[in-house]
Image (spheres, helix red, strand yellow):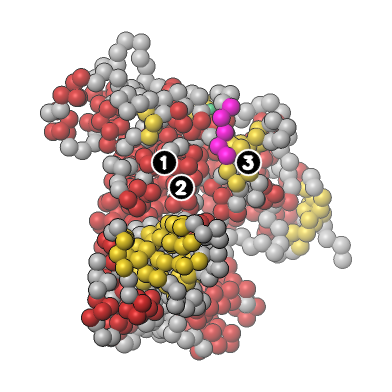
Amino acid sequence: MSLIVINGRELLGMRPERVNEWLMAKGLAEDAKVLLELDDGQHESSVQRVVYSTFCWNFQRIWKKTALCARHALLPPARITSNSHLRLMEHSYWDTFDTYLEAGEELDLEYLDLIGCKSANAIYNYAVDELQEWVETLSLDDYSDVVESPEIKHALDTVEPNRRSVAECHDNIGRLLMTSPDLEKNTLSEFCRSRFIMNGQVLQCIGPKGYPTEISSGYFRHPILNSFLTGLNTLYESAAESRSATKAMYYSKDHVEKGEYFQRKMQLGAFPVARLFKGDCGSTKYLQITMSEELLYAFAGKYRLTKEGKLKAIWKNSRELIGETILLRSSIHCQRFHEHGVCQTCFGYLGHSIVRGSNLGHVSSSELCKDASQALLAVKHSDATVDIADIALGDLEQLYLTPSADEEAADLRLLYNSGLKDLRLAVDERYVRNLHDVKVVDDLSKLTLSNTTSLYSLQLWYTDEDGFEQVQRLTVANGSRQASFTLPMLEYIRKAGWTIVEGMVVIDMKEWEYDDSLLSLPVQHANMLEYINDVETFTRSSGKGSGDGARDRLVNYETLDEGLLMMNKMVSSKLNVNIAHQEIVISCMTAISETDARFPRMPSEGVIRPYEDLIRDRSLAGTLSYEHLERIYGNPRTYLNMNRCYHPMDALHADLPEGVTVL
Ligand SMILES: [Zn+2]
């Protein structure tokens, strides 16, 4: 039997609430299949999906030039999920904007936002009015049906108390809940498939609870194999679980406070970058990067210079650029920075979604911090996951070190390299203050590795092929987490001994077994506060730091370009924050000179200065909204510095000088 053809464009002529009635009048059942005819051809769909999709077509109803294609409609096998309408509307929204922009008309995004809001509201209202009889509830039976289903039962019965097995079990259960034909009619499974509940939370209820964490974020060694459904029945299980709960309570207070205060500090510093200018400043300085898979996400929306000399936006799916060295327009090279803003072209396509009249600096610093605050609050939900913070090695370090074969530990192994003759390993004496313990303690396994040695970096001393002495310095810390020598290495040191050369402890590696692990990183749950601290230390650059710490501060980078890429590396290890926002935050840390804190013409022409200096010297309005006011009142510098600049809070403290208007 041939399917009834429904013309999508014809549906645009009626209110979405009427579409269902109209289709029913054609004699179609609610779950009947139909052929939906759109601008790009006919697509098989169902009555329910067509009705749902039409609610998201208000953009096409108003702006007739916008295409109506498969990407704007919910087509089988896609289900209606909690965010289907957002996804469909996102396509229609940007397609409308782009279509009209190409035709030379820039639509007001706030009007498009309004249409989006109204459409979403119409869906909710329609669902509440029309779909009451389909409301589902969840009962314990649904849970027990899930754990009794053969494949999930098998996964639960065979789980073993190690990281890999627990992770596999979670993966399997997660996948089966979403795809198993046995569970198609199960309400719990349906809720998961429609993404009404988070998979992570369901897994804690039916799968092994996994590895609980201590308040310090360290993992307990033994996993909990019971779930909330079976109950945490032993003293160990309930005690360990209670530590996770303690951690959540602890985080929700001091940590959130600290995270929020960091965000406020960032906003105060970034406020003066108030505006996003329309158009192009015409800057001819570019940021040069080699595109990689990881960078593609953060750089989406940036404009790159093509070989033809044109500017073209990069998208998340611009995979053809991977491996290419490309030139990008960047806010750090924007010529309008001294006017307290950047231009749309330097900022990137993302600028279109900056709400008119909002303060750009405020938006960017909020974007940098908001997911971190959310993650601090949600720490308990992510607790059962068993991944340890990945060992992130730099490009140089990867040439000499590699993760060891033991997946249970975060260990690094030294790679054998025949080019390194006469290899010695040298570490700063300060990192290995307790190394003498290896000579006096009989059983080395009794030592706490991180107390014995705690390394930020190490050096490889060797003779190269031409007979010259060489030194290679490697960073072996993950953020603030420092590496320690492993037990095999401590045993080796006990046997081989060491010498001291100019404050460095030097160990001859002649007899070293390259299969043994050399360094161990603490196994910890990825900790958001650690991330916030790292980003704060980096951007605020309060003081230059010394030795190894210096690498973690923006103020120590020669160029802003290098600093930006380092910051992106740090940020993208934990979160997805578009580079456009990071550029703004980092640009605020530049000034004309060491003595003049005003904005340079373009950020990359300025000098990078510590946050505290900038807050003090840039604008008194900013200073007065910060901390330690007594120091400001008592400092003669406050009254002598006349080279100050605009701050949105100026109007709170004084009448603006004549001729100056609030931006
Ligand atoms: Zn510009």
- Does the residue at mark 2 contact the one at mark 1 (Cβ under 8 Å)? yes
Q: Position of residue 445 (x, y in %)?
A: 31, 83
- Does the residue at mark 3 contact the one at mark 1 (Cβ under 8 Å)? no
CA gap, disc 2 and disc 1: 9 Å
Mark 3 Cα-neighbour bin, 10 Å: few <14, some 14–19, many ≥20:
some
| Residue type marked 1 | Tyr
**What number is the disc on residue 326?**
3
Dividing the picture into quadrants, the one containing residue 654 is top left
Which of these two is toward me, 363 or 178?
Answer: 363
Per the image, the residue denoted by label 2 is 566
Quarter of the image with the N terminus in it: bottom right
Dividing the picture into quadrants, the one containing residue 361 is top left
For the magenta stretch, what is the residue range? 284-288
Mark 1 Cα-neighbour bin, 10 Å: few <14, some 14–19, many ≥20:
some
Which structural element holds mark 1? loop
Question: Which residue occupies 41% across, 84% down?
Answer: 226
